[in-house]
Amino acid sequence: MKCPICGNENLDSTKFCIWCGAPLDTPPVSSTGNAPAPSSVPEQTPVSAPSPIPTPSPEPAPSPIPVQNPSPYMPGYSAIPQENTGSTFGAAPIPVQWSNAGGYAPQSSYKPTNVLCILGIIFAGLSILCCGITSIIGLILSVLGLIFAIKNEERGKGLAITGIIISTVLLLIMLLAMATGNFHVKTSFNWFGNKIDTPEEIEEYVTDQKWIDIQEDTCLEFVSSKKFKYYRDFEELDDYYYEGKYELYIGDEALDYIVNDLSEYGLTEEEIQDLADRNKHYKMANLVVLVLHNEKRYVDGKNDLTDTVVTPYIGFFCTNNKEHALDLTNLNSFGYSLFVPEDEYEDAKKANSK
């Protein structure tokens, strides 16, 4: 059936035109007759299917990790260590080293050893060798070193604690020895092995000491300007003593003086050498001649000498670097005297009495 409006063919059973929607039962318009009244149904334009409305894409969920503000670009620096992804011929990946191009480097965990801790243990060790004399220094340095090592998180705390223990023990021992009168500074320093073997060193040592005879308890003291005082009792220095000038010869000078100036005593060089060979502490280099010119002798506060009395002594200066002695013989009386320094008298007296 042909549509009377648009002229397109439709099926016979169709009531409306599939092209323009007009009813098909409308009579066709005659060219000669009255035209049928136009349908009140407006002509419809074919409508195309509406385009689908785009569905908005869902917004991404916020990241649980807060986004940090980007830092300024630092060339050569990476916050995450990288690995070399290149070919390593089967070897393990080579880690990329940190670069310092941007002025940054990884912080090292190494802590230096505190200097005071080191000095403290050194002085504590020295105090063992010198009978605790440096123990107070070692104690102070070790305590300060321990404080600063803890405060600055440095190494050396174990050294400081060891130094404190050693210094404290030796300091207490030294104080106890001083309280009981058994500590002598000069004797302690002799533990270092101070050698006294030249004539100049022997003369200096001898004239700097006050010497006591451990057998007779007499005392010989050298004073300035080649003068001496010789006390009959070292515990009573106000009375009964001699004074005058002295001569001291050591080594080769002593031997020449014996042979030439003391020739009346009949001693020869061979006899002196034979005497030196009899004792391991005797040496020709330590040969001593001491001549006392007794000008005055005070008894009850008065001088009873009218003439100078000359008393020559010959012998040897003996030492093992810890103990010292003047082993002398009076050529007038042939009396034997063993003089020791005043600070060694008590120990020498005890050793001689055994």
Image (spheres, rainbow, N blue to C red):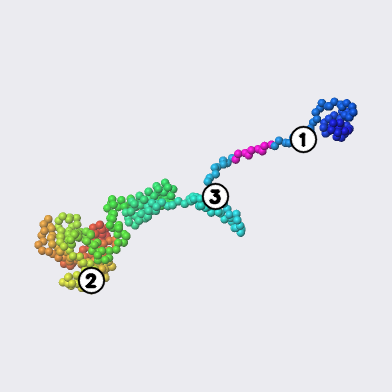
Q: Which residue is mark 3?
A: 78
Q: Residues within 10 Å of mark 3 (few under 14, many from 20)?
A: few
Mark 2 vs mark 1: give the one in front: 1
* Residue 192 shown left or right of residue 56 in the figure: left
Q: Which residue is mark 2?
A: 272
Q: In this view of the protein, which residue sits in the foreground, 299 or 82?
A: 82
Secondary structure found at label 1: loop
Q: In this view of the protein, which residue sits in the foreground, 79 or 74?
A: 74
Q: In the image, what residue occupies the spot 35% across and 49% down?
A: 140
Q: Residues within 10 Å of mark 1 (few under 14, many from 20)?
A: few
Amino acid on which disc 3 is placed: Ser
Q: Is residue 354 visible?
A: no
Q: Magenta stretch: residue 61 in it? A: yes
Q: Magenta stretch: residue 127 in it? A: no
Q: Quadrant of residue 129?
A: bottom left
Sequence-earlier tag: 3 or 2:
3
Mark 3 and mark 1 in contact? Answer it, CB < 8 Å: no
Q: Specify the segment rendered in magenta.
A: 55-63
Q: Which residue is mark 1?
A: 48
Q: In this view of the protein, which residue sits in the foreground, 113 or 137?
A: 113
Separation of residues labelled 2 and 1 (CA atoms): 150 Å
Residue 193 at x, y percent in the picture: 31, 61
Sequence-earlier tag: 2 or 1:
1
Separation of residues labelled 3 and 2 (CA atoms): 90 Å
Q: Main secondary structure of the magenta part?
A: loop
Residue 42 at x, y percent in the picture: 80, 28
